[in-house]
Image: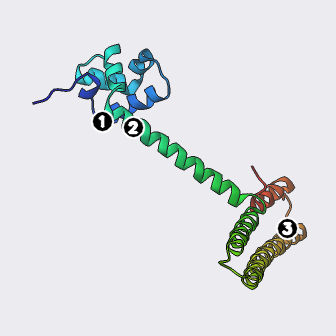
């Protein structure tokens, strides 16, 4: 039966993952040994982590796989954050639609250049894109106008309220939250 090559391999998977995180984050061997979870697991398993244990683990396939998966997760997360920021930015969806329309028109121009499309096809494509962007903008405008009307009604109701003790700062904060302006 094959035996583990080092003391880290003798620890539970969750502790090995914790060690891999710490190593990948640049923690020193002493800092890893002093980590509460790692120290408790080493004591329970009756193992001591030497410098050679860390070096062997860093050369292992398990650590290489951990680093690759963590790098992939970071890359995926960054792409998701960037996409969310673009979508949530003021005019973000409209800007993305404009970029997509531009790219489609550019590709259509290439196809005309190579004789795959005629100029009438390009004119039709341009009209379809323009109408689509216009409809999307009209929908967005209608939603914003409805939100403004709702907020105006709330302001009117609150300003006409005869209740004493209305905190105008609190009202302003709630309006900022509703408009997405509060950070």
Q: Which residue is mark 2?
A: 66
Outermost residue, left direction? Answer: 1
Using the image, determine if residue 63 lies above or below residue 35. below
Which label's residue is closer to the chain start, 1 or 2? 1
> Of 139 and 144, which appears nearest the observer?
139
Neighbours of disc 2 within 10 Å: few (<14), some (14-19), many (20+): some
> Of 143 and 85, which appears nearest the observer?
85
Residue 141 horizontal side relative to residue 62, left or right: right
Nearer the observer: mark 3 or 1; the answer is 1
Residue 13's mark?
A: 1
- In percent of width and height, residue 126 lies at 76, 78
Using the image, determine if residue 22 lies above or below residue 120. above
- In percent of width and height, residue 97 lies at 72, 68
Which label's residue is closer to the chain start, 3 or 1? 1
Nearer the observer: mark 3 or 2; the answer is 2
> Of 120 and 161, which appears nearest the observer?
120
Q: Describe the element under mark 3 as helix, strand or loop.
A: helix
Q: Are marks 1 and 2 in contact (CB under 8 Å)?
A: no
- In percent of width and height, residue 34 lies at 41, 18
Q: Residue at x 84, y 53 (%)?
A: 169
Residue 78's mark?
A: none
Say if residue 55 shows up in the picture: yes
């Amino acid at each position: 039966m094959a035996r583990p090559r080092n003391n880290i391999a003798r620890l539970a998977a969750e502790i090995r993952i914790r060690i891999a995180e710490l190593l990948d984050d640049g923690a020193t061997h002493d800092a890893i040994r002093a980590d509460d979870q790692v120290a408790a697991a080493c004591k329970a398993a009756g193992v001591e982590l030497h410098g050679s244990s860390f070096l062997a683990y860093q050369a292992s396939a398990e650590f290489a796989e951990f680093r690759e998966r963590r790098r992939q997760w970071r890359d995926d997360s960054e792409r998701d954050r960037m996409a969310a920021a673009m979508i949530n930015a003021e005019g973000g969806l409209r800007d993305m639609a404009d970029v997509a329309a531009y790219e489609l028109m550019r590709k259509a121009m290439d196809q005309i250049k190579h004789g795959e499309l005629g100029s009438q096809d390009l004119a039709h494509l341009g009209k379809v894109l323009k109408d689509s962007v216009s409809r999307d903008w009209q929908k967005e405008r209608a939603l914003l106008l409805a939100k403004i009307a709702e907020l105006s009604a709330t302001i009117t109701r609150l300003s006409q309220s005869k209740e004493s003790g209305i905190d105008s700062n609190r009202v302003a904060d709630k309006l900022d939250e509703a408009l997405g302006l509060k950070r």
